[in-house]
Image (tube, rainbow, N blue to C red):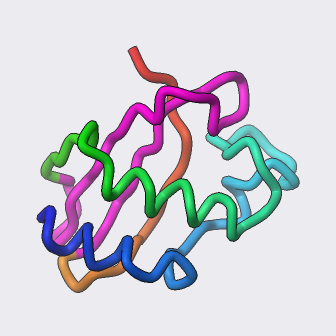
Amino acid sequence: MSDAAFKVADDPASIFVKDTHLASFDGNYAKFATADKRRAQSWIAEGLRSGRAVFKLNGAYDTFKVEVDMQRVIGAKGRTGIRIIAANDRRVVNAFSFKVG
């Protein structure tokens, strides 16, 4: 799992970020504290490389979950965590902020 995550992090521009998870989108979604997709991509790449990243199994076939406390605000409502759903073929399927603890 970690090898795939590191390879994804090597190319932040290829990291998929749903518009619903950007601060500029309306609705009640877990959002990043930015409307800039490139900034969110860089946070995701940083999280994938972090020594604090926790790799977990995910319920969907051929995917895994990475959760990391960035130890600074990166999400709406003061959230500091990033949850990343990645595929074993080196794609980010989804990523969003979450409340740690």
Q: Quadrant of residue 38?
A: bottom right
Q: Is residue 70 left or right of residue 72?
A: left
Q: Is residue 76 left or right of residue 51?
A: right
> Residue 80, position in %: x, y?
54, 29
Asked if 78 appears above or below 37 in the picture, the reply is above
Residue farthest to the top?
Answer: 101
Q: Is residue 55 left or right of residue 17?
A: left
- Residue interval drawn in magenta: 58-87
Asked if 88 appears above or below 30 in the picture, the reply is below
Residue at point 39%, 14% (across, down): 101
Q: Nearer the viewer, residue 7 or 64?
A: 7
> Residue 51, position in %: x, y?
24, 43
> Residue 15, position in %: x, y?
50, 75
| Quadrant holding the N terminus | bottom left
Asked if residue 69 lies in the magenta stretch, the reply is yes
Q: How many marks?
A: 0
